[in-house]
């Protein structure tokens, strides 16, 4: 199956288990990979038949920045749910990076793959 992807999507999120993490935003980055049959869009050369990575990215940023959360696992699940419900996608892989979480590490994160029921 074909894929549409977004790599390194930047957000500023209130995220973490510590009180101070809810007082200032910190970067959360996302890689998003969606299964998508692109043949109809390519044949018609029509954005209406494509998975629009621009509107999808904007929807993800809006969701992530909307409210504070404790765990990056929660953010990953909510982003996957949004993409499966609001876009005609059957499977999505969401990777969340929290680069400022562990000083000794380049980054930390989680990755999930979810399918539409
Ligand atoms: N599996 C997780 N472990 C941890 C998380 C998390 O979201 N998922 N969060 C924290 C703290 O918020 C940390 O990032 C602060 O530096 C610790 N472990």
Image (tube, rainbow, N blue to C red):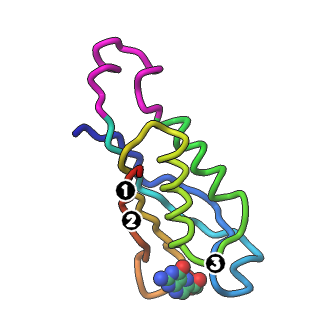
Look at mark 2 in the image and give the residue it sits on: 112
Q: Are marks 2 and 1 in contact (CB under 8 Å)?
A: yes
- Label 2 sits on a secondary structure element that is strand
- Which quadrant of the view contains residue 16? bottom right
Identify the residue at horizontal 57%, vertical 77% (top origin).
71
At 41% across and 83% down in the image, what residue appears? Answer: 105
Residue in the foreground of this view, choosing between 91 and 107 = 91
Image coords of residue 15 (percent x, y): 64, 73
On residue 12, which mark appears?
A: none
Q: How far apart in space, not on screen, are marks 2 and 3 (Cα)?
A: 17 Å
Q: Which residue is mark 1?
A: 93
x 29%, y 32%: residue:
37
- In which image quadrant can residue 44 be found? top left
Q: Left of 22 or right of it: where is 41? A: left
Would you say residue 43 sits in the magenta stretch? yes
Query: In 3D space, how far apart are the residues under numbered discs 2 and 1 (Cα atoms)?
Result: 6 Å
Magenta segment boundaries in residue numbering:
37-52
Q: To which residue does mark 3 refer? A: 70
């Amino acid at each position: 199956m074909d894929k549409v992807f977004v790599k390194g999507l930047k957000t500023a999120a209130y995220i973490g288990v510590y009180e101070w993490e809810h007082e200032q935003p910190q970067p959360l980055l996302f890689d998003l990979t969606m299964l998508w049959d692109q043949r109809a869009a390519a044949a018609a050369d029509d954005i209406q038949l494509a998975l629009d990575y621009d509107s999808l990215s904007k929807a993800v940023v809006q969701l992530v920045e909307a409210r504070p959360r404790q765990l990056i696992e929660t953010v990953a699940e909510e982003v996957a749910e949004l993409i499966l419900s609001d876009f005609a996608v059957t499977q999505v892989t969401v990777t969340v990076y929290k680069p400022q979480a562990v000083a000794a590490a380049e980054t930390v994160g989680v990755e999930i793959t979810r399918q539409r029921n």
